[in-house]
Image (cartoon, grey):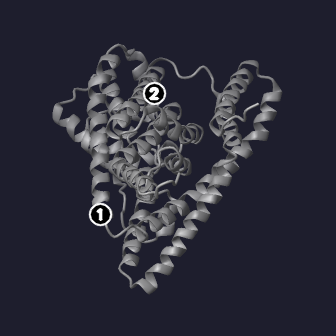
Amino acid sequence: MRKLSFTTWSLLALGLALLLGTWGHASGAPAFELLEQIVKPLGAIWMAALQMTVLPLVVLKLLAAIVSAPSNVSLGRLGLRTLLVFIGMLAAAGVLTLVIAPPFIALYDADPATLASLRASTEIPADAQTATGSALSLLPRNLIAAASKGEILPVLLFTAIFAIAITRLPDEQRLPLTTTFQGLSAAMLKVVHWILFATPIGVFALTYSPALRAGAGAAGMLGAFIVLVSALLLVFTLLLYPVTAIFGRTSMRTFGRATAPAQLVAVSTRSSIASLPALIEGATQHLRLPATSTGFVLPLTVAIFKINRPISSIAKMLFIAHVYAVPLSAGTIAVFLATVMLLSFSSAGLPDGGTAFATLPAYLAAGLPIEAIIVLEATTTIPDIFKTLLNVTGDMSAATMLSRSSRGAMAAEELDEELALPEGAS
């Protein structure tokens, strides 16, 4: 019997967890509650192990990529290209959402009595009341405190500056540091590989409990919003496959095989940061992305690139505006899209985006009632699964498109080496 692949085991674990969780919710048997008490700590341990290793992995991979980059590789130019690709993908996602979402939103008719009841019974939490004064600091006073809060962008910025400083040192000082960071990066990848070996167990443990606790789900307005946002996110995820095949010069099958393990981690953990090790593994093994992509582009995408933000935020804005009959001008929509794109670079790749009401000021500026925003914020658990799935797929897509010229050069070099073999060699 052929051995089942790592991805197959993880998919089987995911399906089994959903099946047992749904069965347990329907039956209410005590045995399913007991199983939850057993597997829930395992999921927490696996998730904690992933989160514990991600920041060191990101920092070490970035350090190793910059200090060991060939002299003919301009990381500044690559960083600019990466940022331009991010902006282009975010803008395209936002514009397409503005085109696709309105016809489906118009199908829903809100009950005025339900809206009045929701507005009267909604309590504004303290996080929402203070959200307008929050801001991201690119230069925090304490990097360790910033990292503990999930603010990886400032950490990456400091790491990049530190690595660039190392490249300016004399060879006798730079070369030992380069060797050290390369060795530490390889060792950290080995540790992460050990943790990823337990992915099927982690996927089962993290999926079983939500499946057991899920009831009939939200109805009416909340249910319509969940279906709308989840469907949009899934459509955009599938759309990235042909887009990557065209602009990244790779087959959809190869791209799917490379991304699938990271997608499984994304679905089970709802954390794109936790998916970084699997992204690097898939990019190296299946897509053969260069070191600049696995060490520089992928950590950067996971840290700051959240392609779901313009889709989910614009869908929420359009939905609330429709339900509460709030008129939206073209200028208001354009400003909202630009604001959301900017805020997307500051959110951590953690469940629920790390902060609950980071984009609240943008909704309020558009004239939307705060009560509606608070109510819909409570429905993020299910859409957050699809948000993370899209983010991780977008991360791999961006890295693949950015490295297409490098992969072409690598293939040409390999062909030249084969043609240069001595006569009679194989």
- Name the residue tied to disc 2: 230
* Drawn side of residue 240 relative to residue 18, left or right: left
From where the camera sits, is residue 394 visible? Answer: yes
Which quadrant of the structure image shows residue 243? top left
Separation of residues labelled 1 and 2 (CA atoms)? 36 Å
Q: Position of residue 112 (x, y in %)?
A: 37, 16
- Name the residue tied to disc 1: 76
- Circle 1 SS class: helix
Q: Position of residue 299 (x, y in %)?
A: 45, 55
Marks 1 and 2 in Cβ contact (< 8 Å) = no
> For the point 70% across and 28% down, which residue is it?
16
In the image, what residue type sits under mark 1? Gly
Q: Earlier in the sequence, mark 1 or mark 2?
A: 1
Image: 62 above or below 425 = below
From where the camera sits, is residue 365 visible? Answer: no
> For the point 56% across and 36% down, which residue is it?
267
Image: 423 above or below 271 = below
